[in-house]
Image: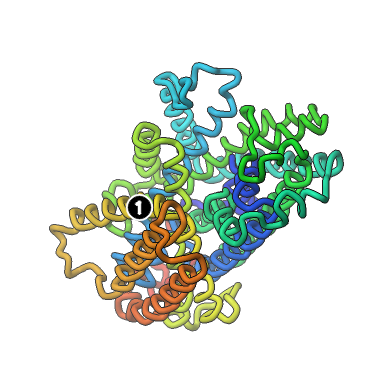
Amino acid sequence: MQRSIGLLGLTFVAISGILGSGWLFAPLLAAQAAGPSALLAWLIGGVAMLLLAATFAEISAILPVPGGIGRVPHFSHGSVVSMAMGWTAWVGYNTAATIEVEAVLRYSASNAPWLYAPGGQLTPAGLGVACVLLMVFTVLNAFGVKFFARINTALTWIKIIVPSLLAAVVIASAFRLENFSSYGGFAPEGLKGILSAISSGGVIFALLGFRHVIEMAGEARNPKVNVPLALVLSLVICLFILGALQIAFLGALSGKDLENGWHALHFSGELGPMAALATAVGALWIVSLLDTSARISSFASGLVSVGSNARLGLAMAQNGLFPKFMEQLSRRGVPLFALLVNFLVSAIFFFLLPFKEVIALNTSSIVLSFVVGPIAVLAFRRLLPDTPRAFQLPAAPFTGCLAFIVASLIIYWSGWDTLSHLGICLAIGFVLLLVRNSQGGFDSLDWREASWLAPYLAGIMLLSYLGSFGNGANVIPLGPDMLAIALLAAVVYVFAIRLSLDKTKFKRYLAEEFLDEIEEYDVPEDAPAEKPDFRF
C-alpha cells in the first residue's frame, strides 16, 4: 500500500461521501418529517456525527489501519466484536455503492427512459447498465489510491460549488420567513418528527460519509495529524452546505406547496425538489448545472464507497471472516480481489432487494458498526497509555458514553422495519462466523470480550419492536422508550469497557498487524517489532 493521500485529498474523500445523492432530496425528506424543525434535525445529527467522528479521530491517529471500522475493534475487543462490526459495516458499504449507482441512473432516466419500467424498477437493460457502471467504479479504484484521490478531488470541487451556489441563489431570489412559523408552527410533528428526520429523513444517511476517512486512514500521509483534521473539517464544511440548502428549501416554498401540510410535500421531476424550486424562482440556468452535478455527485460518492469498502474487505480477511485471498494486494497496492468480491455483492443487491429497502438497511447497519468507537477509545487509553496522541477526546469517559448513547438512539429511531432487516443480516454474519471457524476451534475466538453484544443487540431489538418508530407495536410511548435506550446503552457501555482485551492478547494481535504491514507497506524486516506505531 502507499501512504500518498494528503490532507486535502483525505478531506475531499469524506466530503464526496457526504455530498452524494442525498443533498438533492434530503431537504425534502427532512421537511416532510419535521417541517421547519428539520433544521434542528441537522443540528442534532451533526453533533451526533461529530461525537462519533471525535472518538475515531483519536483512534485512527494512533492506529491508522486499512478498513478501520472492521479492524480497530480487533485490537480493543478481539475477533468476535471485530467480525460483527466489520460485517455490518461491509453490508452497509455495499448497499451504499448500489444506492449511488441507481442514483446516477435515476438522474439519467429522462434521457434514457428505457432504464426503468413503469413501476419504477430497473428494466433488464437498466440492470445491465447498473452493473457496468459499478464495474467502472471498480476499475477506476484498481488504478491505485493516488489516481483515485486525484479524480475524486477534481469531482468534489464541483460537489462543493454547485450546492453552495444553489442555496445562495434560492435564498436571494425567494425567501419567505413566515414559512418557519405558519402551516403548523415550527415543529408540526413535534419531537418525534425531528427524531424521525434524523434517522429516516436523509440526515444521518448523508453525514455518515465521513466514515471514508477512517477506511482510508491506512493510506494517509502523516495520519496522526491529517486523519483527525480531515474528519472534523469534512463534517463542518458539509454541515454548513447542507444547513444552507435546508434553509433555502424551507424558505422558498409557496403557500400552494404547503396547503396540505408539510407531510404532503411533493415535487416531480428527475432532479427532485431542489431543481423544482430553482425553476420556480426563475433560476433556469442553475437547473442545467444541477442536471450535470447530480450525476457527478452520485458518481463520485459511488467511487469513494467502492474504494473504502475494498479496504474494509481486506480488514475482514485479516480478521478471519473472509477468505485469505481478499488480503492480496495488486502491484499498485490495491486490494484487487476485495474490490472484485465487493463488486459481485453490490451487484446482487440490485436483484435481491427493492431500492427503498436497500436505503433503509444502509443507515442502521453503518451506524451499528460505529458504536465500538466510543468504547475503543477508553480501551486504548489503557492498552496504549504512552502512545503520543495528536488529538485526544476531551472528557473521554463522559463524551464516549454520550456518543454511545446517541449512536444507539439513531439505530433505534430507524424503526422496527429497518432493524428487523438488520437482524437478518447479523444472523447471516453469525452463521458465516461459525462456518469460517468450525475447523479452527471456537475456543480461539474472543467470546468473553464480545459478551456485551448479546444484551445490547437483544435490548435494542426488543425496545424497537415495542416502540413507535417504523411500525413498532407502540407499547412504549415516546419519551420512556428513549430513556430505556439511553439506560441500556449506558449500562452496556460500562460493561463493554471492562471487557476489553488484556494486554497479552493485545500485544499478540498488534504484533500480527505489524507483520501484515511489513508486507503491505514494504517496511524493512529489521524494523523494531516492539514499536507497533513504527510508521510515525
Side of 190 relative to 409 (left or right): right
Side of 365 relative to 242 (left or right): left
Element on which disc 1 rests? helix
Task: Looking at the picture, tell me which residue is in the foreground, 450 or 309.
Answer: 450
Task: Looking at the picture, tell me which residue is in the foreground, 228 or 425.
Answer: 425
Query: Is residue 518 among the parts visible in the rendering?
Result: no
Image quarter of residue 262: top right
Side of 457 relative to 179 (left or right): left
> Residue 44 at what x, y percent from top left?
62, 63
User: Which residue corresponds to the image point at 36% horizontal and 31% vertical from the top-left?
Assistant: 351
Task: Looking at the picture, tell me which residue is in the foreground, 431 or 473.
Answer: 473
User: Which residue corresponds to the image point at 59% horizontal and 43% vertical from the top-left?
Assistant: 22
Q: Crowdedness of circle 1 by 10 Å Cα count: few (<14), some, many (20+)?
A: some
Side of 163 relative to 428 (left or right): right
Amino acid under disc 1: Ser
> Residue 104 at what x, y percent from top left?
55, 31
> Residue 399 at what x, y percent from top left?
56, 76
Query: Is residue 311 among the parts visible in the rendering?
Result: yes
Image quarter of residue 275: top right
- The coloring applied to the image is rainbow
Q: Which residue is mark 1?
A: 420
User: Which residue corresponds to the image point at 38% horizontal and 34% vertical from the top-left?
Assistant: 347
Task: Looking at the picture, tell me which residue is in the foreground, 303 or 178.
Answer: 178
Placement of 284 over or under 311, stated as above or below: above
> Residue 325 at what x, y percent from top left?
29, 46
Residue, far right:
172
